[in-house]
Image (spheres, rainbow, N blue to C red):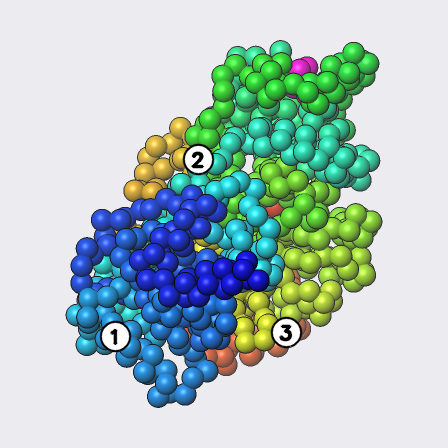
């Protein structure tokens, strides 16, 4: 009885604790679980009223803010939580202000007025402007309630950002609250305070400031990163029996076996690669191709996967830029290609042939027991690999000009993987379909590096056009994630039974514009709507992506919009500039299209050996994508065209993409049947040319509708500017070869 009375007395005493003592106890509790880094503390006013506007990531956000500042904070708290019997006593001590959108207008205004009065009397008030905890890992649109609070209030708005909280207790993954303890305690988080904004700042301006703080805090994750070979070894040792990779010609390989095979290859290749910084690889996406890339990482080399869809002369030029002396390839692969890469050829069949029992045993023992420092030494790594060292050089697609060597560091790629996984929540239960070649930035980063980072499985196939074989591989291996291009989706709709794609959970499409008609047709065929994303080789490559919405009782968080490419990834910033003067500081008017510039830890180091071209697109950390886009109030981007896909006719910019979409709509087809380009014209500067794949009668009907549509007359090519082709020129990634398209158009236009 005495113990019960003592406990009751203690609880009663807690309820009567003064504000300062309760905040101290909460500070102790918070710092026991989190290691808090505070950035921008000097932006906090020492006295006087202020409004903190913060993103909302977990139920612990208020505790993190209390622990990050000495000043008492009055929080606007969701009324249902405030009224909880476990929360209400503490909320009253902290003088929280209950508020809810479900309140009657008069009650809601009273809550907001109470916040205004508190600020006028010199207090600090905090509002989580998203209105609810994010369930999708992205910064949600800001509600405008804080604008009402600051009306006629002479006090600053302090933008506040929490980073690193996602994945910690009381945050959300896959729409469910995380209840487990983090892998490391205390869990590192960053609380960033931005420069004060005027009280009249609107919700868009404040959201941009918070997003900038989140992007700035991303750099502090760097301390927890290690180069990719270290992560691969760790994953293999933690889960040696877990499925890792397979292809049509190779049985299933688990993580442990992959590490052993990689060590055997590395020990044999170190003599061949001695004295070389960059090594050439000429292999398709496959188990052997992946293992050779991992061996290069372990040897401390920079793997350069050469683009085997280019001409021999262009491949040789790429190899020369990198100083490549030896190229690892396969006899069978070269026989199919009928192509000879440059330099000294080393055949993988010879390197991997007949490992002895002693080699296998040594590799097994090293993989199982040797410290990583010994593994590096055995593999021939001459000096330790750092995060800022080159991980690879990927040559741009060359769709609009000569390929350029994009230098990507370990930090670039690891940051992009973390950004990508931050919102898509890939786990070791997922299996990816690896059809994109390793010379493609998405193929290298996502299908080669991502599985080794998160311990997931990958199913390789060398020919992305082989729809029947791909359907079989997806079905037999229960693939859950497909990364493809719109061109590939068109093939799969024709050649893959719908049941074969039954295991797919996510389909992400990039490289080209995903038309609404194609997305609808794919969804009707397979019951799964593809999500459009956007990236560039220079950004390692992902920049923005649509994700699934979160829906629950009382919740609807929008993760994607049709016709958009999504929001920029966490840790990135985007801004729109004048297309003709992209480095001008003059902002583009709201709602108007502008040149898309992005900034983030995944942006490349530069172009290999081309400082002038690097300076053209990279300044002060901002990368000019060359794409024209619009940005809506919710942060969703829409690409309206690439600058190279506009024609300046009579002084007006004509977008090729809009013409292609209109023509496809009038033709009533989901497939890409029109490609618009231009040729020089003496009178108007340029003249539009349209390549198509329609029959004559189908074209006649389409042109009749096109002539009557509401597009400006200047945008409409003449009927004699339409030329039929059997196939459009494509790159190996399935992307349109725009340079070849222009050459074909010039040939047609030169005909009498």
| Rendered position, 395 above or below 86 | above
The disc at residue 223 is 2
Q: Which residue is mark 1?
A: 116
Magenta stretch: residue 264 in it? Answer: yes
Q: Magenta segment, which residues?
A: 263-268
Tag 1 or tag 2, which sits nearer the N-term? 1
Q: Quadrant of residue 107?
A: bottom left
User: Which mark sits nearer the N-terminus, 3 or 2?
Assistant: 2
- In this view of the protein, can residue 681 be seen by the observer? no
Return the x and y of residue 715 as percentages of the image width and height.
43, 69
Viewer-closest of 667 and 34: 34
Q: Which mark is residue 668?
A: 3
Tell which tag, 2 or 1, sits nearer the viewer.
1
Secondary structure, mark 3, is loop
Residue drawn 54% across the image and 21% down it: 300
Mark 3, other Cα within 10 Å: few <14 / some 14–19 / many ≥20: few
Q: Say which of marks 3 and 1 sits in front.
A: 1
- Examine the structure image and report whether residue 285 is included in the region drawn in magenta: no
2 and 1 marks in contact (CB < 8 Å): no
SS majority, magenta: helix
The local secondary structure at tag 2 comes to helix
How far apart are labels 3 and 1 at the CA level? 56 Å
In primary-sequence order, the first of circles 3 and 1 is 1
Q: Is residue 438 above or below residue 329?
A: below
In the displayed structure, 488 sits above or below 127; it is above
Q: CA distance from mark 2 to mark 1?
A: 40 Å
Q: Quadrant of residue 75?
A: bottom left
> Residue visible at 59% across and 75% down?
553
């Amino acid at each position: 009885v005495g113990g019960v009375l003592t406990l009751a007395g203690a609880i009663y005493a807690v309820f009567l604790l003064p504000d300062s003592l309760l905040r101290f106890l909460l500070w102790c509790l918070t710092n026991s679980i989190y290691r808090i880094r505070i950035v921008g503390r000097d932006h906090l006013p020492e006295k006087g009223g202020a409004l903190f506007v913060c993103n909302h990531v977990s139920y612990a956000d208020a505790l993190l803010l209390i622990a990050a500042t000495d000043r008492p904070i009055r929080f606007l708290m969701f009324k249902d939580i405030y009224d909880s019997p476990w929360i209400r006593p503490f909320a009253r001590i902290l003088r929280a202000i209950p508020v809810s959108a479900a309140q009657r207008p008069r009650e809601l205004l009273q809550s907001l007025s109470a916040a205004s009065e508190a600020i006028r009397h010199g207090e600090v008030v905090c509002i989580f402007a998203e209105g609810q905890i994010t369930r999708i890992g992205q910064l949600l649109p800001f509600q405008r309630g804080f604008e009402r609070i600051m009306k006629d209030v002479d006090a600053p708005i302090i933008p506040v950002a929490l980073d690193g909280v996602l994945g910690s207790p009381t945050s959300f993954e896959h729409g469910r609250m995380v209840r487990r303890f983090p892998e490391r305690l205390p869990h590192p988080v960053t609380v960033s305070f931005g420069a004060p904004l005027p009280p009249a700042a609107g919700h868009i301006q404040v959201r941009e400031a918070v997003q900038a703080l989140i992007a700035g805090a991303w750099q502090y994750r760097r301390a927890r990163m290690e180069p990719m070979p270290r992560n691969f070894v760790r994953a293999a040792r933690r889960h040696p029996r877990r499925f890792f990779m397979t292809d049509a010609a190779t049985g299933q390989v688990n993580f442990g076996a992959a590490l052993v095979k990689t060590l055997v290859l590395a020990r044999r290749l170190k003599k061949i690669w001695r004295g070389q910084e960059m090594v050439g690889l000429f292999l398709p996406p496959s188990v052997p191709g992946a293992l050779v890339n991992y061996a290069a990482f372990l040897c401390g080399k920079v793997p350069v996967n050469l683009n085997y869809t280019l001409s021999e002369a262009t491949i040789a030029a790429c190899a020369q830029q990198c100083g490549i002396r030896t190229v690892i390839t396969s006899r069978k692969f070269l026989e199919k290609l009928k192509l000879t890469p440059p330099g000294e050829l080393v055949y993988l069949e010879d390197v991997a042939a007949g490992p002895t029992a002693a080699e296998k045993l040594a590799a097994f023992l090293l993989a199982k027991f040797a410290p990583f420092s010994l593994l590096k030494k055995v593999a021939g790594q001459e000096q330790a690999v750092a995060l800022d060292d080159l991980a690879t050089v990927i040559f741009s697609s060359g769709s609009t000009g000569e390929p350029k060597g994009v230098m990507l560091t370990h930090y670039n790629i690891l940051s992009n993987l973390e950004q990508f996984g931050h919102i898509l929540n890939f786990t070791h239960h997922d299996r990816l379909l690896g059809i994109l070649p390793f010379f493609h930035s998405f193929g290298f980063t996502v299908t080669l590096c991502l599985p080794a980072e998160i311990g997931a499985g990958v199913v390789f196939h060398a020919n992305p056009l082989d729809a029947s074989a791909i359907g079989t591989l997806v079905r037999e291996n229960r693939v859950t994630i497909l990364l493809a291009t719109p061109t590939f989706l068109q093939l799969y709709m024709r050649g893959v039974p719908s049941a074969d794609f039954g295991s797919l959970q996510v389909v992400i499409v990039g490289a080209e514009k995903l038309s609404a008609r194609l997305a609808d047709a794919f969804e009707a065929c397979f019951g799964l709507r593809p999500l459009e994303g956007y990236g560039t080789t220079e950004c390692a490559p992902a920049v923005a992506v649509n994700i699934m919405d979160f829906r629950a009782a009382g919740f609807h968080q929008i993760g994607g919009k049709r016709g958009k490419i999504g929001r920029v990834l966490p840790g990135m910033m985007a801004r729109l500039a004048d297309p003709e003067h992209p480095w001008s500081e003059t902002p583009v008017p709201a709602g108007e299209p502008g040149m898309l510039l992005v900034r983030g830890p995944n942006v490349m180091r530069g172009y290999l050996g081309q400082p002038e071209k690097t300076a053209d697109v990279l300044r002060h950390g901002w990368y000019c994508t060359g794409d024209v886009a619009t940005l809506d109030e919710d942060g969703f981007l829409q690409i309206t065209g690439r600058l190279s896909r506009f024609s300046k006719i009579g002084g007006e910019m004509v977008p090729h993409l809009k013409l292609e979409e209109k023509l496809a709509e009038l033709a009533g087809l989901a497939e890409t049947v029109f490609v618009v380009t231009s040729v020089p014209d003496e009178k108007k500067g340029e003249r539009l040319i349209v390549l198509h794949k329609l029959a004559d009668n189908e074209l006649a009907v389409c042109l009749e509708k096109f002539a009557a549509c509401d597009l400006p007359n200047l945008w409409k090519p003449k009927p004699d500017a339409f030329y039929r082709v059997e196939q459009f020129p494509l790159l190996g990634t399935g992307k349109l070869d725009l340079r070849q398209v222009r050459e074909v158009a010039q040939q047609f236009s030169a005909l009498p």
